[in-house]
Image (cartoon, rainbow, N blue to C red):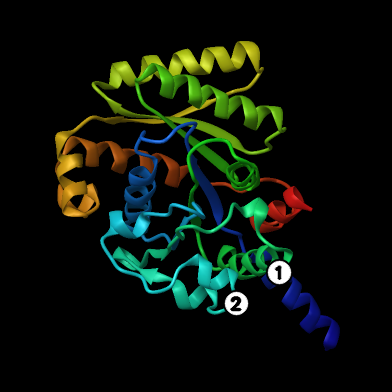
Amino acid sequence: MRNEALHLQQMMEASKRPATVLAIASGKGGVGKTNIAANLAICLAASRKKVVLFDADMSLGNLDVIMNFNSKHNISHVLNGQRSIEEIIHVGPDGLEIICGASGVEELAELSEFQRRRLIGELTRLQTHSDAIIIDTAAGISKSVMAFCLAADHVLVVTTPEATAITDAYAMIKVLVGNSFAGRISLIVNMAESIATGKKIYQQIAEVARRFLNAEVDCAGVILWDERLRRAIRKRKPVVLAYPNSRVTSSIVALAAKLSKGMAVRGDSETFFRRIVDWFF
């Protein structure tokens, strides 16, 4: 009887599909990364997926501003042992669970061993009860940013048509490939004047990555420029909610639909948060 119970437990544990972890990253700031993360999470949650949106910017987190809510507690209170992860979660549209970042907290690499283990232990529980975890990383290629990206199943690199943004997006891809990233890399071209312009930029980056890095970069999507995005930001309301019929909303909805169909986890047995621990220890 005990063996049957043990076998049943093992079957149940094996059937628990861990959440797909999507890291939204950019080589530089100002490309709309956090707005994409927030609106993408809302769209995925609206499609009946259980989604967690985590602001992984440990020093300048601002998801609460974009989502227009005030949170008394954030990830810093978890790091210090004052709150559990469940106690700081803010529930958004369609059950979207939001974990706010902090302001003035040290880089992940500079946290104490207690704080790092506390963070990983608390966050690991999220991966077993969610369909998707969206990580809004800080801009750039710091060690903390790369830890989240390299541990993810899928990294979405955000760029714009600006030359500096394109160069920095390629630099991000180069670092991922140089660190033997085992997941999937895709590009989002944001603030494009047209679909054709966005696809041309994607093709340029993908060709260089293929030629010099021997790496394949997918096109996640092109998000069109729309003045209503600025209006939504001023209203402190996600654009997919403020202007559901805008062309920028249509772009993000299409992105969410594409990602929803292709969600998968990496083949290795380690969890996302375990991989982060391995990166630092």
Residue 81, numbered label: 2
User: In percent of the image, x 62 and y 54: which residue is there?
Assistant: 108
Residue 56 in percent (x, y) is at 51, 53
Q: Is residue 63 above or below residue 205?
A: below
On the rendered structure, is 265 left or right of 186?
A: right
Residue 21, numbered label: none
The residue indicated by pointer 1 is 114
The residue lying furthest to the bottom in this view is: 1
Residue 236 in percent (x, y) is at 21, 54
* Residue type highlighted by circle 2: Gly
How packed mark 2 is, by other alpha carbons closer than 10 Å (few <14, some 14-19, many 20 or more), is some
* Distance CA(mark 2)–CA(mark 1): 9 Å
* In contact (CB < 8 Å): disc 2 and disc 1: yes
- Where disc 1 sits, the SS reads helix
On the rendered structure, is 81 left or right of 66?
A: right
Q: Is residue 44 above or below residue 247?
A: below
